[in-house]
Amino acid sequence: MSLDIEEIRQLIADLENSSLREFEVTDGDFNLHLSKNEAASIINPVATTQNAPQAPAAPVDAPHALAQPETAGVEIVAPMVGTVYLQPKPEAPMFKQVGDKVTVGETVAVIEAMKLMTEIHSEVSGTISEILVENEEVVDYNKPLYIVKPD
């Protein structure tokens, strides 16, 4: 059994919209494990749907997560579907914190997909202005991970 990227995306979406907390498929060497049990996070629909119309912004003094303006800068995005790790190992510090400098080619995260670990490298130099995902969050293809204010 082998799933293509669109089938995996559909499974992730189906899990997200269901009452199930975990889903696992194993067939020979193929294993796919999806879980909502780790760190729960709020998904900002504006950030995940790039061309969707945006709702009118609330007055500036209204503290509402969706009403806050997006930070200007360059996004570092997930090149694949998988579990994102923002630190090299559980007891180690995070690759980057807000305010940290980043250079082109520097590792900023690792994405695990089907038991393969892929380092995610910055394609821009600058300062991390926002971290858009939680450690161990399942991310979709092209999901923004960081916002970098270029130098």
Image (spheres, rainbow, N blue to C red):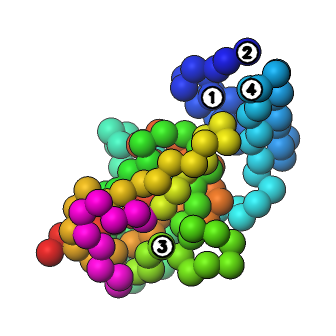
Circle nearer the N terminus (1, 2): 2
* Label 3 element class: loop
Circle nearer the N terminus (1, 4): 1
Residue highlighted by disc 2: 1
Residue highlighted by disc 4: 30
**Kind of residue at badge 4:** Phe
For image coordinates 59% across by 31% down, the residue present is: 9
151 sits to left or right of 1:
left
Q: Are marks 2 and 4 in contact (CB under 8 Å)?
A: yes
| Residue 8 - label | 1
4 sits to left or right of 60:
right
Residue highlighted by disc 3: 95
Does residue 34 sit above or below 136 in this rendering? above
Marks 3 and 1, Cα distance to the nearest angstrom?
A: 27 Å
Circle nearer the N terminus (3, 4): 4
| Residue 71 - label | none
Judge whether residue 45 can be spotted in this image.
Answer: no
Q: Quadrant of the C terminus?
A: bottom left
Q: Are marks 3 and 4 in contact (CB under 8 Å)?
A: no
Marks 3 and 2, Cα distance to the nearest angstrom?
A: 35 Å
Near mark 2 (Cα within 10 A), the count class, few <14, some 14-19 or many ≥20, is few
* Label 1 element class: helix
Near mark 3 (Cα within 10 A), the count class, few <14, some 14-19 or many ≥20, is some
For image coordinates 54% across by 26% down, the residue present is: 5
**Kind of residue at badge 2:** Met
- Position in image of residue 21 (x %, y %): 84, 46
Magenta span of residues? 99-108
Circle nearer the N terminus (3, 1): 1
**Kind of residue at badge 1:** Ile
User: Tag count in the figure?
Assistant: 4
